């Protein structure tokens, strides 16, 4: 009975219900999209493993470490393997075509990252080619690169023109794995640096340190940093996650702003739905008074209003959530080059659901209070 | 339009709750819209204030930032000997050879390390930036491990007070002063003696060289001379252009984000306005019939409702803009994508932004009110009188 | 006075001697289209209304009396026949011309007053003057005059919901005369009023007719209201039954 009344009432002001629904769908979509952007921002840190530490120069990332530190790190008990990793920062054709390139120790680096999946024969081919490179699936798809293709890069940190041959394409273990980067031999980088700028040779950006037990991360980080205390280049070691988060932290203001703004859209839609409910109640004062006169408890009218508001928002929310999938997929094709991982998470869907429930409830509060205050006599007089 | 304005305004006042909710939605959209534009304007103002048309900056060929750049001592000497470079009273060339590095320092609030630019320079370097004024303490002494921090660093980072010290590159650096960069990017830097910083960081050469031009018009000659010298593999730019390029990526990001958000959000607000105006029309069908009978034309009815919608939107616009103007009290610090360092800048409200925000609000009002107003205008008098 | 009903021809015959009628209706018809069916509302109406008349249109509901009034007032369009008001064939006017014509020539009085709830009594009366190019001070003078004529000079700043039904209808009458129209049309002007207020409103209309020579056409089914008029015309099922002089005239 009450459900029937609710549905019938929604269809009475068809245009208004339709407009409110459209507004809800847009808001739920925008909210989901913004939360996905925020998630994407943290994507790198989400894939970080607890079994990997990053050791860098204590001053800042722009300072390098001498490569001979590698042996001393490896000697520390609990460390399994150590890969060198230097940010290359090359430009492919135009600065707009940005993607990360790292010079790393192979195959150690891939042993440290079991989430990169690649046929062993491709790794063999890579180890045989000094100027070879490995690229992630996303990157390969973006530029249509295949095995054997040559990728010319203009160096910025390491001047000159560099050309790499694609020897392998790796996939991510799941869609949370970033595969929009390129790896090549650190030794090749160092060789060329030696020729051009001997003073800058044998220096590396960071060490990626594999440890046996993830729960010893704090202890081992301290041990590594103690090893180089008071040396020319003091180190700072942290878990990979903390390292990635320190990047995100640099742009935290922007992330915070996006997060804040994602709630603004919910407040906007709250205003719209509350307005719809307020108008509905105002128009139906006489009806509600009649219902009360017929003997229905005041709670019945309140339930009607909450029911109608929630039905409306849940309907809009469901539509918005369903539409989020194609919209975010479309969006991904545009921003894929900025955000390596861009997907609708389960948490976001829950947030969307929660938001529409809250909006549905809040929007009904004032109108419900108003309806409860209607006195039968006044309400009936409202008919004229 | 011949219906009196108070007829429109009072109708908005009569249904206050609905008006407030609808205008509130619009206000939020305008707030976001204005806030992003103000942020972008603040960023531009900061970077425009950083460079001077009188200065040329020289960096290694192909690099975008001072951090990546390297200029050898020989190259720096060759620049000092350029005839287009200005000289001071003591006939010394007005050329500043600088070292620029990034250090991680704990940010106030969460103690997370963020990148701060440390710039090594000398007396000439300070003289080349007349907008920079010391506001506390003194300048660093040549040959001492001392630094002076910008206002933004002083306020935004832990332990950056005069009398304190901070440790990097294996040394403790005493903080001896705070300077005001005149709302420029220098506010987000720390300055020290170039030779001391060079030793600490084991740098033989410099990062960048800044030269005061004898005449602004000399830039082309300097550029030609630098480019033709095979020993100088350097790019030369006037400072304002360089700093504009520094902020391009961030500025673009801000405007795209802001405009995309505003557009999506405005859809919600426009729908809110449409709902409100449709209700306004159906509640006043009788009035519409009466007005038409009295001799008001369809166009007058259309205008009256459209104006009501626009007025509603402008109400929201004013509220949103007023709220946004308070943002000018805040400073934002975020990473500049290009230079990888923290840059603090404020929200800056310009008359242009205020106009754009109000026009944006008015457009939302027109779009949201158009169909309802059309419905009002298309009613037949007899039907409207009967329904009312 | 005689109660003899007079035929349409007799009215027309009188008109030949006296000045031409202000409203001249010949074979007027009106039908509405419901679905694919034409529903006749008025059929073959012929009627002359002389200047200075106070005519009551009576008939049961659905007789078409309000439709006839709407046609004369130019807010509805006839389906056939001739309709001249003040010498002008209003059926031929465009919609915009008709709007301007109404503003200048017709004063409206409605059953439910139809005042703008957000405007004061003064502003409601002033409303039709917004369509003229009178100056602000001229408008003020006229509105004050009209309101004192209906006895509401002390209620100018009041909003409709602060006035009684009778007072609201008097404001509406002030609004109807403010442009000095050729014709005043009133649709059940006493329909929503108590006896006392109805009598006041009718006395006011009579005063407008007798003292200021206003031509008034009034739709009503209240016999008390008819007594205020000079003539009464009866309608039934869309046809004119005839016009008679109101007794006591």
Image: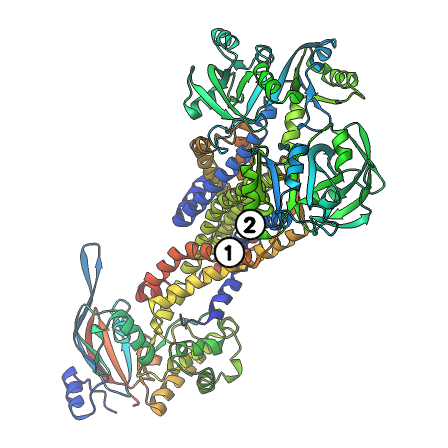
For the residues labelled 1 and 2, the Cα–Cα distance comes to 9 Å
Rendering quarter of residue C79: bottom left
Query: Relative to B38, is A167 on the left or the right?
Result: left
| Residue at image location 74% in from the left, 8% down from the top | A77
Query: Relative to B270, is B71 on the left or the right?
Result: right
User: Same subunit under labels 1 and 2?
Assistant: yes
Near-viewer residue (C248 or A304): A304
Near-viewer residue (B204 or C145): B204
Query: Relative to A284, is B187 on the left or the right?
Result: right
Rendering quarter of residue A187: top right
Q: For mark 1, what is the residue?
A: B356
Instruction: Tell me residue A59's x, y (percent).
Output: 73, 28
Contact, mark 1 vs mark 2 (Cβ under 8 Å): yes
Could you say whether the residue bearing mark 1 is in a helix, strand or loop?
helix
Name the chain letter of the residue that bears numbered label 1: B
Q: For mark 2, what is the residue?
A: B37
Name the chain letter of the residue that bears numbered label 2: B
């Amino acid at each position: 009975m009450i459900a029937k009344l609710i549905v019938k009432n929604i269809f009475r002001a068809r245009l208004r219900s339709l407009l409110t629904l459209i507004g809800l769908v847009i808001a739920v979509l925008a909210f989901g999209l913004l939360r996905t952007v925020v998630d994407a921002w943290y994507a790198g840190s989400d894939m970080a493993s607890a079994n990997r530490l990053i050791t860098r120069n204590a001053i800042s990332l722009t300072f390098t470490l001498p490569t001979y530190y590698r042996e001393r790190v490896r000697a520390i008990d609990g460390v399994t393997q150590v890969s060198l990793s230097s940010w290359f920062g090359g430009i492919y054709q135009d600065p707009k075509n940005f993607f990360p390139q790292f010079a790393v120790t192979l195959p150690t680096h891939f042993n440290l990252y079991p989430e990169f999946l690649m046929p062993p024969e491709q790794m063999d081919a890579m180890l045989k080619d000094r100027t070879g490179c490995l690229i992630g699936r996303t990157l390969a798809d973006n530029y249509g690169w295949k095995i054997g293709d040559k990728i010319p890069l203009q160096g910025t940190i390491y001047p000159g023109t560099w050309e790499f041959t694609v020897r392998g394409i790796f996939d991510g273990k799941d869609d949370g794995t970033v595969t929009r980067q390129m790896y090549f031999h650190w030794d090749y980088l160092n060789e060329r640096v030696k020729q051009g700028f001997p003073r800058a040779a044998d220096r590396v950006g960071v060490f990626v340190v594999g440890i046996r037990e993830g729960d010893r991360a704090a202890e081992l980080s301290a041990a590594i940093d103690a090893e180089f205390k008071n040396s020319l280049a003091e180190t700072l070691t942290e878990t990979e996650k903390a390292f990635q988060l320190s990047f995100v932290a640099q742009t935290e203001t922007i992330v915070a702003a996006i997060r804040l703004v994602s709630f603004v859209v919910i407040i906007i839609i709250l205003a719209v739905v509350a307005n719809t409910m307020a108008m509905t109640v105002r128009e139906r004062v006489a009806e509600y008074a009649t219902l009360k006169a017929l003997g229905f408890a005041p709670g019945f009218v309140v339930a009607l209003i909450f029911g109608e508001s929630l039905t409306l928002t849940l309907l809009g929310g469901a539509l918005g959530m369903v539409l989020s999938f194609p919209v975010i997929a479309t969006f991904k094709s545009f921003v894929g080059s900025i955000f390596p991982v861009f997907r609708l998470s389960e948490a976001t869907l829950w947030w969307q659901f929660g938001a529409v429930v809250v909006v549905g409830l809040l929007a009904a509060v004032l109108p419900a209070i108003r309806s409860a205050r209607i006195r039968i006599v006044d309400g009936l007089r409202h008919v004229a | 339009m011949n219906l009196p304005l108070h007829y429109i305004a009072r109708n908005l006042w009569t249904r206050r709750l609905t008006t407030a909710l609808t205008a509130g939605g619009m206000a939020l959209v305008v707030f976001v819209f204005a806030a992003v534009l103000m942020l972008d304007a603040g960023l531009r103002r900061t970077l425009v204030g950083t460079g001077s048309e009188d200065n040329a900056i020289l960096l290694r060929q192909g690099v975008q930032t001072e951090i990546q750049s390297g200029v050898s001592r020989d190259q720096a000497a060759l620049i000092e000997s350029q005839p287009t470079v200005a000289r001071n009273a003591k006939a010394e060339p007005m050329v500043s050879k600088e070292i620029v590095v990034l250090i991680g320092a704990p940010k106030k609030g969460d103690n997370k390390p963020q990148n701060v630019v440390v710039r090594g320079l000398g007396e000439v370097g300070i003289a080349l930036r007349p907008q920079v004024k010391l506001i506390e303490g003194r300048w660093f002494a040549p040959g001492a491990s001392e630094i002076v921090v910008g206002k933004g660093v002083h306020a935004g980072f832990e332990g950056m007070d005069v009398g304190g010290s901070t440790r990097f590159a294996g040394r403790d650096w005493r903080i001896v002063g705070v300077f005001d960069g005149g709302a420029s990017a220098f506010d987000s830097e720390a300055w020290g003696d170039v030779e001391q910083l060079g030793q600490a960081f084991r740098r033989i050469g410099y990062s960048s060289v800044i030269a005061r031009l004898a005449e602004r018009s000399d830039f082309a000659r300097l550029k030609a001379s630098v480019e033709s010298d095979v020993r100088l593999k350097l790019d030369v730019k006037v400072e304002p252009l360089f700093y504009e390029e520094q902020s391009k990526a961030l500025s673009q990001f801000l405007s795209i984000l802001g405009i995309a958000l505003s557009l999506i959000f405005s859809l919600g607000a426009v729908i809110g306005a449409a709902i409100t105006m449709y209700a306004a029309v159906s509640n006043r069908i009788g009035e519409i019939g009466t007005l038409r009978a009295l001799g008001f034309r369809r166009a007058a009815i259309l205008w009256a409702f459209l104006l009501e919608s626009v007025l509603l939107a402008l109400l929201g616009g004013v509220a949103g803009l007023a709220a946004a103007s308070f943002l000018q009290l805040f400073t934002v610090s975020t990473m500049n994508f290009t230079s990888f360092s923290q840059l603090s800048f404020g929200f800056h409200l310009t008359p242009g932004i205020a106009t754009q925000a109000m026009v944006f609000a008015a457009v939302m009002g027109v779009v949201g009110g158009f169909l309802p107003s059309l419905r009002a205008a298309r009613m037949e008098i007899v039907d409207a009188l009967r329904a009312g | 006075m005689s109660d003899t009903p007079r035929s349409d021809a007799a009215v027309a015959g009188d008109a030949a001697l006296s000045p031409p009628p202000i409203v001249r209706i010949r074979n007027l018809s009106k039908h509405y289209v419901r679905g694919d069916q034409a529903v006749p509302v008025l059929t073959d109406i012929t009627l002359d209304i002389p200047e200075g008349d106070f005519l009551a249109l009576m008939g049961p509901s659905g007789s078409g009396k309000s439709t006839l009034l709407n046609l004369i007032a130019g807010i509805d369009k006839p389906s056939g026949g001739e309709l001249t008001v003040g010498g002008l064939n209003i059926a031929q006017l465009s919609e915009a011309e008709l709007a301007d014509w109404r503003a200048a020539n017709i004063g409206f009085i409605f059953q439910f007053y139809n005042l703008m709830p957000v405007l004061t009594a003064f502003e409601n009366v002033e409303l039709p003057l917004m369509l003229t190019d009178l100056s602000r001070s001229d408008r003020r003078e006229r509105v004050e005059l009209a309101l004192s004529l209906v006895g509401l000079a002390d209620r100018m700043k009041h909003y409709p919901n602060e006035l009684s039904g009778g007072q609201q209808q008097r404001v509406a009458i002030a609004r109807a005369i403010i442009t000095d129209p050729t014709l005043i049309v009133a649709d059940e002007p006493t329909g929503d009023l108590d006896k006392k207020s109805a009598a006041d409103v009718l006395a006011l209309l009579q005063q407008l007719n007798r003292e200021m020579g206003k031509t008034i056409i009034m739709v009503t089914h209240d016999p008390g209201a008819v007594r205020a008029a000079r003539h009464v015309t009866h309608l039934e099922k869309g046809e004119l039954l005839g016009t008679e002089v109101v007794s006591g005239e």
